[in-house]
């Protein structure tokens, strides 16, 4: 009732306001979705797979603090957080290393992407984005390993050419302040364009303070996740202190810096050269969930934080139309470097453990596109070479004594290569039917050596794997009438085990330790999609329904394991239950989604999404829950747009995740959920943008209006409470 009243009241108010406003009415047609990948057709309606996009206009208006929040508020996927400086997207019950992240078509996933929860998506600044495309279901045929649940392709803004003297120079300044964490953010970009060359420079700065949770009890559950105590170190001694504001999530703030430089040049022969450099860095990011782990002393950890998370990307691109066999050509040469580190010590223990991972990636891809009278052919090759250096030491915070400790990954030589070729063909059978078929084949090599096993003796000193990989897809789009599209698609996906799967020694919390298992095999999926799109003749209404069923083969699951015949071992002074990644036979994931968009009255658009997912590990004895499966979730909203600006009201909601649906000791993090599981929740939100003068826009909004206290499934930190934000953008 409250949801209906909230939206109905807003609808009546906006409708009344619109009757008294005399400015020009915006054409009431839904925007045609155009995709920016070089490996598939531009028009979404020709694809048999489910794709959702967020364009630059939507990104700018939504004004979220980072890309993780942008995705989580879309209503089309769920984002888990272990700390404020994090965000791990889940697509169709697959998360982390089973979801492929791309930036400008270059894969971010590397040989230490873990199956648990990641935070890498926040290193892509939302202000740099031109669009985000979310591909649902296995897309390994198009994009390669790891695309089991789907692929998120984040495309950054381009340096655009111009022959207009008035459009040679442009610049944008924007700022934002948010009350929920005292956020202070600024962004600047500068664009210079000539007829045959252009440059784009962008820089962003974010200062996030400690995050406040909601103070109002969730009517679906009880108060949970409050922060009554925290740890400080005074005169070299750890002290448990009472938090003067239990709703303030102490030690969750951080700062972040992002830079992007692009240069484009085209020759009279039709070649276009591009340089794309991106750099992201942060201060230390507290691992909030671990800082709330309890023990007999009150809190288990005195310190637990990620060191500065650094990401560098450099890409040289070459494109030319009709360059080879009448095919359009695109070549990308890329270099990436990622550094992440973990720093932790127990309460009352003054040796701070420091573990650093440095990953270097080199890649080359060759993509070709050829048009026929009734079809399009996409084909190409790609190769990635990755190296890992894993180091560790401890330092006493009082005596400054430094000692060697065990590394997170093998401390010898670690490398992984991926070499694939792919082909995809889209054919127009008739004006009513499109057909798609594609295939990919590749070979992956992984080498890892252990140069010193003093701290954790293992029955082997090297891990070597060779895997032949393959995937395929076939799909059909049929339009029996102008108002109906019918879609079906069968696709396979694969994920090759990486260093994190095979060789990590990791304390997962709660008295559990994960040990290496060198016998893992690649994970594979087979998915069937059935979809129906109903739309109006005037393009003012659209409803899309998709049902899918995924058979998960050789799923890698973290489960009980015997290490040297023992089920428990002493690790870091704690007797811990032994776990290991294992291929646990078969599992399935199934579900459906509904997306509705349409205009109710002139300029007033209604948007609604609903998503349901079910996952089970299958065996002869019984079916048990598969982890990473979110409860049902979605979004309902109204968006009103006129010449003077935009007003949007929406609610986000999640259903209950009962503890019986958790995979215990897995990645669902039952230790960070209330007794009985994660309660259902919903938030009410209002966003506005006003065009003050032709080149200035004011953004004001309120998120979580009711200040509800809640936590997203599998997260280790409470979601933000009521947030009042404001920002200004000025264009030169």
Image: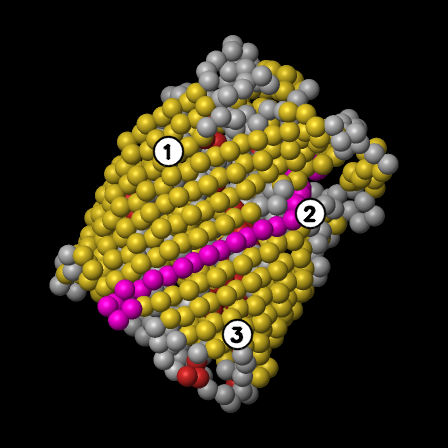
| Place of residue 712 in the rendered image (x, y in percent of width and height, measured from the top left) | 58, 46
**Picture coordinates of residue 488, whole percent (x, y):** 26, 50
Q: Mark 2 = which residue?
A: 252
How far apart are the two marked residues, 3 and 2, measured between alpha carbons? 33 Å
**Residue drawn at (58%, 35%), measured in percent from left and top?**
356
Q: Which mark is residue 409?
A: none
| Residue for point 40% across, 79% down | 27
First in residue order: circle 1 vs circle 3: 3
The residue positioned farthest toward the top in the image shown: 565
Looking at the picture, tell me which residue is in the foreground, 411 or 183. 411
Residue under label 3? 171
Q: Depth-wise, is mark 3 or mark 2 nearer the camera?
A: 3
Residue 652, relative to residue 159: is it above or below? above
Of all residues, the one furthest to the front in this rendering is 268
**Residue 631 appears left or right of 287:** left
* Residue 279 among those drawn in magenta: yes
Please rate how many residues cluster around mark 1, counting C-alpha atoms within 10 Å: few if below 14, some from 14 to 19, many from 20.
many
Left or right, 124 with respect to 402, comes to left
In which quarter of the view is residue 713 placed?
Answer: top right
Check disc 1 and report the residue beneath it.
496
**Mark 1 and mark 2: span between their CA atoms?**
34 Å
Q: Earlier in the sequence, mark 1 or mark 2?
A: 2
Q: Position of residue 247 (x, y in %)?
A: 75, 49
**Range drawn in magenta:** 267-294
Q: Quadrant of the C terminus?
A: bottom right
The reply to whether the magenta stretch includes residue 519 is: no
Q: Nearer the viewer, residue 77 or 201?
A: 201
């Amino acid at each position: 009732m409250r949801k209906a009243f909230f939206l109905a009241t807003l609808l009546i108010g906006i409708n009344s306001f619109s009757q008294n406003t005399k400015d020009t009415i915006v054409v009431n047609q839904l925007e045609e979705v155009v995709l920016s990948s070089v490996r598939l057709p531009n028009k979404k309606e020709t694809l048999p797979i489910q794709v959702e996009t967020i364009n630059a206009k939507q990104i700018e208006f939504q004004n979220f603090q980072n890309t993780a929040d942008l995705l989580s508020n879309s209503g089309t996927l769920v984002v888990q957080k272990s700390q404020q400086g994090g965000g791990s997207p889940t697509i169709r019950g697959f998360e982390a290393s089973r979801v492929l992240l791309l930036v400008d078509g270059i894969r971010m996933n590397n040989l230490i992407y873990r199956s648990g929860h990641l935070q890498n998506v926040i290193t892509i600044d939302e202000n740099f984005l031109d669009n985000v495309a979310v591909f649902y279901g296995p897309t390994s045929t198009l994009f390669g390993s790891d695309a089991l649940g789907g692929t998120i392709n984040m495309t950054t803004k381009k340096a655009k050419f111009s022959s207009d003297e008035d459009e040679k120079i442009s610049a944008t300044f924007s700022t934002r302040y948010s009350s929920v964490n005292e956020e202070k953010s600024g962004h600047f970009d500068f664009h210079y364009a000539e007829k045959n060359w252009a440059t784009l420079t962008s820089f962003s700065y974010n200062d996030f303070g400690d995050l406040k949770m909601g103070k109002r009890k969730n009517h679906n559950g009880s108060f949970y996740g409050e922060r009554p105590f925290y740890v400080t170190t005074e005169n070299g001694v750890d002290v448990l202190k009472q938090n003067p504001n239990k709703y303030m999530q102490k030690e969750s703030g951080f700062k972040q810096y992002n830079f992007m430089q692009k240069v484009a040049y085209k020759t009279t022969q039709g070649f276009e050269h591009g340089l794309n450099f991106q750099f992201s860095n942060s201060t230390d990011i507290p691992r909030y969930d671990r800082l709330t782990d309890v023990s007999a002393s009150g809190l288990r950890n005195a310190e637990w934080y990620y060191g500065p998370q650094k990401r560098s990307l450099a890409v040289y691109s070459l494109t030319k139309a009709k360059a080879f066999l009448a095919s359009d050509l695109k070549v990308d040469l890329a270099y990436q470097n990622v550094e992440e580190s973990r720093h932790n010590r127990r309460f009352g223990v003054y040796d701070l453990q420091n573990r650093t991972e440095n990953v270097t990636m080199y890649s080359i891809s060759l993509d070709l596109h050829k048009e026929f009278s009734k079809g399009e052919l996409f084909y190409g090759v790609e190769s990635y070479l990755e190296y890992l250096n894993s180091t560790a030491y401890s330092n006493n915070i009082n005596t400054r004594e430094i000692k060697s400790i065990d590394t997170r990954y093998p401390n010898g030589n670690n490398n992984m290569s991926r070499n694939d070729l792919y082909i995809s063909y889209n054919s127009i059978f008739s004006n009513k039917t499109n057909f798609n078929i594609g295939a990919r084949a590749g070979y992956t090599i992984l080498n890892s050596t252990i140069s010193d096993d003093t701290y954790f003796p293992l029955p082997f000193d090297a891990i070597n794997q060779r895997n032949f990989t393959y995937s395929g897809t076939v799909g059909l789009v049929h339009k029996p009438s102008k108002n109906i599209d019918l879609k079906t698609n069968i696709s396979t996906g694969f994920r090759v085990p990486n260093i994190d799967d095979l060789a990590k020694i990791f304390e997962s919390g709660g008295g559990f330790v994960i040990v290496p298992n060198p016998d893992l095999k690649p994970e594979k999926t087979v998915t069937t999609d059935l979809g129906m799109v109903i739309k109006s003749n005037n393009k003012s209404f659209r409803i899309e329904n998709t049902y899918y069923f995924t058979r998960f083969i050789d799923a890698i699951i973290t489960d009980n394991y015997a290490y040297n015949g023992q089920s428990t071992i002493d690790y870091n002074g704690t007797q811990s239950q032994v776990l290991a990644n294992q291929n646990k036979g078969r599992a399935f994931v199934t579900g459906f989604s509904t997306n509705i968009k349409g205009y109710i009255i002139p300029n007033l658009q209604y948007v609604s999404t609903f998503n349901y997912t079910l996952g089970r590990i299958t065996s002869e004895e019984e079916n048990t829950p598969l982890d990473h499966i979110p409860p049902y979730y979605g979004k309902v909203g109204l968006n009103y747009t006129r010449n003077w600006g935009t007003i949007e009201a929406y609610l986000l909601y999640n259903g209950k995740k009962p503890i019986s649906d958790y995979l215990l000791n897995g990645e669902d993090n039952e230790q960070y959920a209330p007794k009985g599981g994660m309660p259902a929740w919903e938030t009410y939100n209002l966003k506005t943008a006003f065009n003050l003068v032709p080149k200035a826009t004011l953004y004001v909004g309120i998120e979580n209006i009711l200040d509800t206290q809640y936590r997203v499934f599998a997260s280790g930190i409470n979601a933000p409470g009521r947030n009042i934000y404001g920002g200004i953008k000025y264009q030169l």
